Structures are given as C-alpha cells and as structure tokens.
C-alpha cells in the first residue's frame, strides 16, 4: 500500500515503492512529486476527508517539480492517500505538456462547472441557454451538458432505475470536470435530485470550481408551467397504482413518492432571488455572470 | 418526444449558442484526432507534442488519454472485451462533445478493435482523423516504457494487447511511421498539416 500523508503546510511521503520526501508547498497548495519506479503497477488517486486532488498538468505551475518521463506530479490540499486498488491496474498517469494555465491564457477565462439543479420545469435549461448566450456575448466559451442531451449519447445505455440514475450523474460530473480542466465554463443542467450524487460531483473538482445553482421554484409553479407536459402525464400515469421508474426519476415531489427532491444545503447560488419569482432567464443569468466575475472566472 | 434507447419523454434541447458560434469564437473547427497503436508506440507522447504544436499556433486542444480517463469517467471498467468496447464508446462520445464545443480533441488510446474505432468515426463522419502509430511489436516491447510487456510475458497480465490479445490495425487512416530518429515535433506537424487541409 502506498501512502502519501499530508499535513499542511508540508507533505511527507512514505512507501516502499516510492522515493518521496518533504517539499515546501507553493502558495495555497501542497504537492508531492513521485518518481515512479519501473515496476510500478498502478497509481490511483483517492481522497478522503474532503481532500481535493488535482493533476498538475503543466509543471510550470510548480517551480520545484522535476520533469522526466518517470515522474507524476500531483497537487492538492490535505492529500491523504494514494492506493493501488480498483478495477483497472497497470494504469500510469500521463502528464500533458500543455496545461490548464495555458488554456486559461488562451481563453481569458478559468474553467469551472456551473451545476444547475432543481425540479422539472424550474427553468434549468432556460437558464443554461441564457447563461451560455450571455457568456458568448462577452467572448467567453461555455458548453452545456444538458441531462436530456447526454441521454442521447454518452448515457444512452442507462435506464431510469436507481443505480443508473446515480451513474448518470456520476458520468456527467466526470465529463464536466474534463471540460473545466480544458478551461471551458461547463454548464450542467440536470435535475440531480440526490444530495450525495451532487456532492460526489463537487468533490471531483478543486474548491470553488464547482458552482451549484439551485432553481428553487415551488412545485405548484413548476407544474403550472409544465413545459413538456410531463406533470400532466405523471398525474395520469400511474400503472397498477404505481408510478413507472421514469416518473420517479423526475422527482416532482408528489406526495406518496418515497424519494423527494433533496434541495442543496450549501449551494453557491439560490435562484430566483427572494421576492423575485418573475425574473426572466436573462436576468437570472446576469446574477450568475456577476458571481463568475466576482470570483475571477471571467479572466485568466 | 424521443424514444431512443431506454428513455422516452426525453427532449433534445436547442441552444442558441451553437457549433458555428463557438467556431467563430475560437477561430477553429472542432474535431477528433484519434491516435491508436500498441502500448509503447508513442501515442501519449505524440498527443502531448501535438497539443503543444497546436497551442503555438493559437489553437485550443484537449487530450483524452486512455489511461487518464480510466481514473475518472471509466474507472468502473476493466479490460474484458465488453469493457474495452464500452471504454472506447464513452471516450468517443466525450470526444464528440469536445468537438462540438469547438476544441480539437486528441484521443490517445490503444483502442485495439477496428469495429470500436469505426463506431467512433461514425459518430463524427466529417471530423474524425485516425492516426495509426505503426510501431512494430518488437520495438514497442524493447521500449516497454511502463514495464507492462515484461509483466505480460511473465504471465502476470492476461489479455494484454499485442501479446495475448489482438491489435487490429486501421485500414484507412492517416499513417505515421515513427522511427527512433524522427523527432516527435515532425510527426505532430504532419498531423497538423493533415488537419489544416482537411478541415479549414
């Protein structure tokens, strides 16, 4: 078992398979440079205790990391453990020579994930489109991962059964992470009803890069809008007194359904803002834009 | 309503900012460069070199490395045939998303089965550039950068491509024939030239 223990501000590394050592951290992050031995079978990043691990893809981010074909560089805070468990063995992490910093300079923005969650009909897709348009008009590159779009491609093999619902969110989270890593502002617009699934996606990204936006629109208003006619179907759609799986997935909060929508407890933005239920998607998008500007995501 | 796959009542969402707008913003066309070949044939190294080359020309790219993706999106997959197929399918779908976003997505995977690579090509008929790292097995094994051939020969890894699992070379692709003395920058320039003439 390989263990990399981290106590801020320094990291120590102990393992029979690695040559580690004490390194002074740069700025807010601590990192360890592991020279990989030829006999290394696999490396896998795992984090506990809310540790954030991220791959340093460009060694320009760190002035003391060495660069050779046998080295992998990891950066993060509160690094806890790297282990060799998992389905895929014999996998070695490859460093890329063009890192995140370069892409940020090219795009003049910082990659992040805007995760829009809420009931069906709460306005997620409208906000996603309005936000995308607003960012484009400012010369920023954004891309929407809409729950519906992803169903036609990446997740077309999944059903509405419980385990597939979690897998749907997991895959969207992983893809959103890749987009953020590429410097793109990735807008994920997904009902994502379970708190633990959303939190699992949050943990994939460095702190601050996962921006959870909760469309807090009451069920009655969602149902009154019913843009896709799904609530009407749901009301009429019981089969033998039981709701079919796909309706459960909608998480429309009907009384008697066991798994209601779990609203976020600590999201970055809750919309629409209090007392302003009539705000248009464009107005709401501007609130998100202000947040992004304030946090520095719209500059390199 | 769409009735594709297991899901009904799924609606395709139209976004006002589309592929053309993103192309205009980035001044490039999105595509997928799919680098295939045996382990140790130089795929990852070419991917990095190509990415760097594109960057110096002001083009935005992103690498989907087979090993890296298996740490995240595909961490639930192993190396059985059906898992390999699913691995390639998912990478192909993600690469398609990146291409739609306007990026040059460089996918670097062994991807040993022709039908899996062809399935990815079918997702992107006009924007798929297949690059075959045609390095002989003997040379790959001699390099053995991750020590995997040694383990495979010792029987410690089963189903290793090239040793006891087949690699099916592409029939129609942009071929590069790396030799030891050829600098990777030259090869990535070849790929860039091909891309530039096909897709500008």
Image: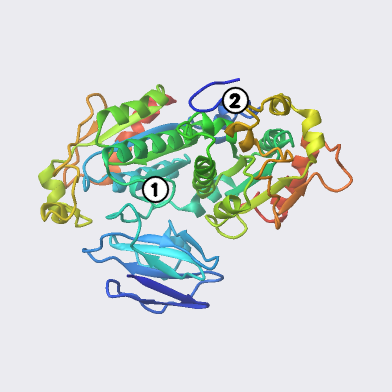
The chain to which mark 1 is attached is B
State the quadrant of the N terminus of chain B: top right
Say which quarter of the image contains residue A233.
top right
Pinpoint residue A163: horizontal percent, then vertical percent: 50, 43
Pinpoint residue B18: horizontal percent, then vertical percent: 59, 28
The mark that comes first in sequence, 1 or 2, is 2
Residue B76: give its label.
1
Q: Is residue B100 found left or right of A274 in the rendered image?
A: left
Is residue A143 depicted above or below A99 in this figure?
Answer: above
Is disc 1 surrounded by few (<14), some (14 to 19) or many (20+) residues within 10 Å?
few
Res. A30 visible in picture: yes
Q: Is residue B177 found left or right of A217 in the rendered image?
A: left
Q: Nearer the viewer, mark 1 or mark 2?
A: 1
Instruction: Report which residue position mark 2 lands on.
Output: B12
Say which quarter of the image contains residue B62.
top left
Residue at position x 38%, y 69% in the image: A33
Is disc 2 surrounded by few (<14), some (14 to 19) or many (20+) residues within 10 Å?
some
Residue at position x 36%, y 45% in the image: B77
Q: Is residue A253 found left or right of B142 in the rendered image?
A: right
SS under mark 1: loop
Pinpoint residue B94: horizontal percent, then vertical percent: 45, 37
| Scheme by which the image is coloured | rainbow
Say which quarter of the image contains residue A225.
top right
State the quadrant of the C terminus of chain B: top left
SS under mark 2: loop
Pinpoint residue B133: horizontal percent, then vertical percent: 23, 38
Res. B27 visible in picture: no
Q: For the residues tagged 1 and 2, is the chain the same?
A: yes
């Amino acid at each position: 078992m390989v263990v990399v223990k981290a106590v801020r501000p320094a990291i120590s590394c102990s393992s029979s398979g690695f040559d580690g050592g004490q390194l002074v951290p740069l700025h807010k992050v601590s990192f360890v440079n592991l020279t990989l031995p030829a006999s290394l079978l696999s490396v896998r990043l795992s984090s506990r205790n809310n540790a954030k691990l991220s791959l340093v893809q460009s060694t320009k981010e760190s002035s003391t990391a060495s660069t050779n074909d046998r080295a992998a560089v990891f950066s993060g805070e509160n690094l806890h453990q790297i282990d060799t468990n998992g389905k895929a063995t014999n996998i070695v992490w490859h460093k890329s020579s063009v890192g995140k910093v370069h892409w940020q300079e090219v795009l003049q923005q910082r990659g992040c994930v805007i995760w829009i969650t809420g009931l069906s009909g709460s306005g997620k897709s409208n906000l996603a489109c309005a936000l995308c348009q607003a960012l484009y008009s400012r010369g920023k590159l954004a891309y929407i991962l809409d729950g519906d779009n992803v169903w036609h491609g990446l997740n077309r093999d999944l059903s509405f059964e419980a385990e597939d619902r979690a897998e749907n969110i997991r895959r969207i989270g992983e893809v959103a992470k890749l987009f953020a890593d590429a410097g793109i502002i990735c807008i994920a617009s997904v009902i994502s009803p379970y708190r633990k699934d959303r939190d699992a996606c949050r943990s994939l990204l460095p702190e601050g890069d996962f921006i959870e936006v909760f469309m807090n629109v009451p069920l009655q208003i969602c149902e009154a809008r019913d843009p896709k006619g799904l609530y009407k179907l749901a009301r009429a759609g019981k089969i033998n007194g039981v709701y079919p799986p796909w309706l459960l997935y909608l998480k429309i909060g009907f009384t008697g359904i066991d798994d209601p929508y779990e609203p976020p407890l600590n999201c970055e933005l809750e919309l629409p803002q209090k007392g302003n239920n009539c705000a248009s998607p464009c107005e709401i998008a501007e609130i998100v834009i202000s947040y992004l500007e304030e946090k520095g995501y719209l500059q390199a | 309503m769409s009735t594709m796959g297991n899901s009904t009542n799924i609606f395709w969402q139209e976004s006002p900012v589309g592929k053309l707008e993103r192309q205009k913003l980035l001044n490039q066309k999105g595509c997928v460069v799919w680098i295939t070949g045996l382990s140790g044939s130089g795929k990852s190294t070419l991917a990095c070199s190509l990415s760097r080359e594109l960057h110096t020309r002001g083009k935005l790219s992103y690498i989907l490395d087979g090993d890296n993706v298996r740490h995240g999106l595909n961490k639930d997959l192993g190396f059985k045939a059906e898992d390999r197929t699913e691995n390639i399918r998912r990478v192909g779908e993600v690469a398609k998303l990146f291409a739609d976003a306007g990026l040059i997505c460089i996918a670097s995977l062994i991807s040993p089965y022709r039908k899996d690579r062809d399935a990815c090509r079918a997702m992107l008929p006009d924007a798929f550039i297949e690059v075959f790292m045609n390095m002989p097995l003997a040379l790959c094994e001699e390099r053995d950068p991750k020590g995997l051939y040694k383990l495979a020969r010792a029987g410690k890894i089963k189903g290793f491509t090239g040793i006891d699992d087949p690699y099916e070379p592409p029939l129609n692709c942009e071929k590069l024939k790396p030799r030891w003395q050829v600098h990777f920058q030259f090869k990535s320039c070849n790929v860039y030239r091909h891309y530039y003439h096909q897709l500008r």
